[in-house]
Image (tube, rainbow, N blue to C red):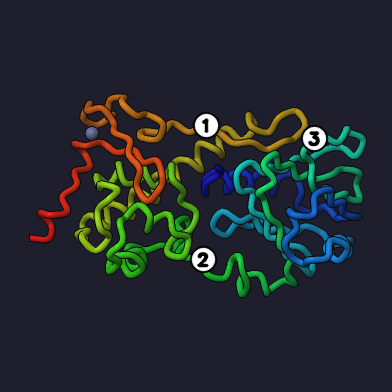
C-alpha cells in the first residue's frame, strides 16, 4: 500500500510526465473507480478540453489541478498511473484512460479495483469528502512541534493508531509509523497523553526525518521505477523495523518483535522502545 513518500514520488513523476497536456476525451472501463460525479458521462464531459496545470498532493490523495476542475485520485492498494502512446495495446486492469490531444494517454491501472476518483469544481475540493477532514500535513512547513502536540498530546488513545488516523495527521501508514516510533524510542502502545514533551519532540523529528528520507530515496531512484512504458511503481526503501521480525535491531542488537496493535502488524524493539506505561502514571 502506498504511503505518503510513495504518493509524493508518484506526484513528482506525474508532474514531469503530464503537466501542460490537454485532455481530448476520457474513457472509463470500470465505473466503480469514479465516485463523483455519479454519472460517468458527466465525468468524461467535464474533463474534455481541460489542461493539467499541476499535480498536487494532500495526504495520500493526488490532485490533478486543471483549468476549471480538480481530479482527486487515491491509489489505495495497487492503483498506478502510466503514460502511454495511443497506439500501445491496452493492458489488463486498465480502468480509466485520459486521451490527450498530443496522442499520448495517461492510463490508470488497478488490479484490486479499490482506487477512487472524485472530480470537483476548482476550489471546492478541500470543502468536501474525501479531503474535508484531513489532519496535519507532515511534510509542510506548517507542521511545527506545537501543532503536532496540540493535535495528539491530550488523547488517551495508543500512539500508533492515533498516528494512523488521517484526521490528526495525514499520510503516515503502517510502515512509516513503525519506523518513526523506533527512531523516537517510543513503544507503539504508549498512550499519547503519557508522552513527555521531549518524547513528542523526538517523535515529531522522527516523522519528518523518516518521511523526508523516503521521499529523497524515491526521488533519487525516480528513473528506475518508471519503466519502458512510463509506468510509475513503488520504490523499495531500506526499513529499520518493517518486515524485520526476529532480526537484530540496528541500534542494540535485540531481536525485533512483531505484535498486533489496533489490528495492524506492528514491529518494535523491546529494548529501544520500552512500554513504560505504569511507570509514567505513578
Ligand atoms: Zn533496539
Q: Nearer the viewer, residue 114 or 193?
A: 114
- Residue at image point 63% right, 57% down: 56
Q: Residues within 10 Å of mark 3 (few under 14, many from 20)?
A: few
- Upstream in sequence: badge 3 or badge 1: 3
Circle 2 residue: 134
Is there CB contact under 8 Å for labels 3 and 2? no
Q: Judging from the image, what secondary structure is the residue with disc 3 in?
A: loop
Judge left or right: residue 21 versus residue 56: right
State the residue position of label 1.
236
Ligand 1 has an atom within 8 Å of the beta carbon of the residue at disc 2: no
Give whichever of discs 2 and 1 has the lower sequence position: 2
- 3 or 2: tag closer to the N-terminus: 3
Q: Give the left or right position of residue 6, taking residue 227 as reference.
A: left
| Neighbourhood count class around disc 2 (C-alpha, 10 Å): few under 14, some 14–19, many 20 upward | some
Image coordinates for residue 253, horizontal then vertical, percent: 22, 26
Query: Regarding mark 1 in the picture, which secondary structure is present there?
Result: loop
User: Residue 92, which numbered label?
Assistant: 3
Label 1 Cα neighbours within 10 Å, binned few <14 / some 14-19 / many ≥20: few
Gap between marks 3 and 1 measured at Cα: 24 Å
Q: How many marks?
A: 3
Quadrant location of residue 251? top left
| Camera-nearest label, 2 or 1 | 2
Amino acid at each position: 500500500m502506498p504511503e505518503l513518500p510513495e504518493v509524493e514520488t508518484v506526484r513528482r513523476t506525474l508532474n514531469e510526465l503530464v503537466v501542460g497536456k490537454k485532455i481530448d476525451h476520457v474513457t472509463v472501463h470500470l465505473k466503480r473507480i469514479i465516485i463523483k460525479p455519479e454519472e460517468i458521462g458527466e465525468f468524461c464531459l467535464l474533463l474534455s478540453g481541460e489542461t493539467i496545470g499541476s499535480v498536487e498532493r494532500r495526504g495520500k490523495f493526488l490532485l490533478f489541478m486543471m483549468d476549471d476542475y480538480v481530479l482527486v485520485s487515491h491509489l489505495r492498494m495497487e492503483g498506478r498511473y502510466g503514460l502511454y502512446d495511443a497506439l500501445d495495446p491496452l493492458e489488463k486492469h486498465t480502468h480509466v484512460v485520459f486521451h490527450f490531444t498530443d496522442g499520448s494517454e495517461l492510463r490508470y491501472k488497478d488490479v484490486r479495483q479499490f482506487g477512487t476518483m472524485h472530480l470537483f469544481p476548482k476550489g471546492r475540493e478541500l470543502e468536501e469528502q474525501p479531503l474535508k477532514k484531513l489532519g496535519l500535513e507532515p511534510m509542510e512547513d506548517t507542521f511545527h512541534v506545537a501543532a503536532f502536540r496540540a493535535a495528539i498530546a491530550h488523547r488517551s488513545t495508543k500512539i500508533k493508531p492515533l498516528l494512523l488516523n488521517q484526521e490528526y495527521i495525514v499520510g503516515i501508514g503502517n510502515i512509516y509509523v513503525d519506523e518513526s516510533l523506533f527512531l523516537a524510542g517510543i513503544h507503539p502502545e504508549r498512550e499519547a497523553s503519557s508522552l513527555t514533551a521531549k518524547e513528542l519532540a523526538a517523535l515529531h523529528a522522527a516523522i519528518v526525518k523518516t518521511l523526508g528520507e523516503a521521499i529523497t530515496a524515491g526521488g533519487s531512484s525516480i528513473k528506475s521505477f518508471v519503466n519502458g512504458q512510463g509506468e510509475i511503481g513503488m520504490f523499495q526503501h531500506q526499513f529499520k523495523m518493517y518486515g524485520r521480525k526476529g532480526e537484530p535491531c540496528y541500534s542494540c542488537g535485540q531481536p525485533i518483535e512483531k505484535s498486533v496493535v489496533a489490528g495492524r502488524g506492528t514491529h518494535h524493539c523491546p529494548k529501544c522502545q520500552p512500554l513504560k506505561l505504569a511507570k509514567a502514571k505513578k
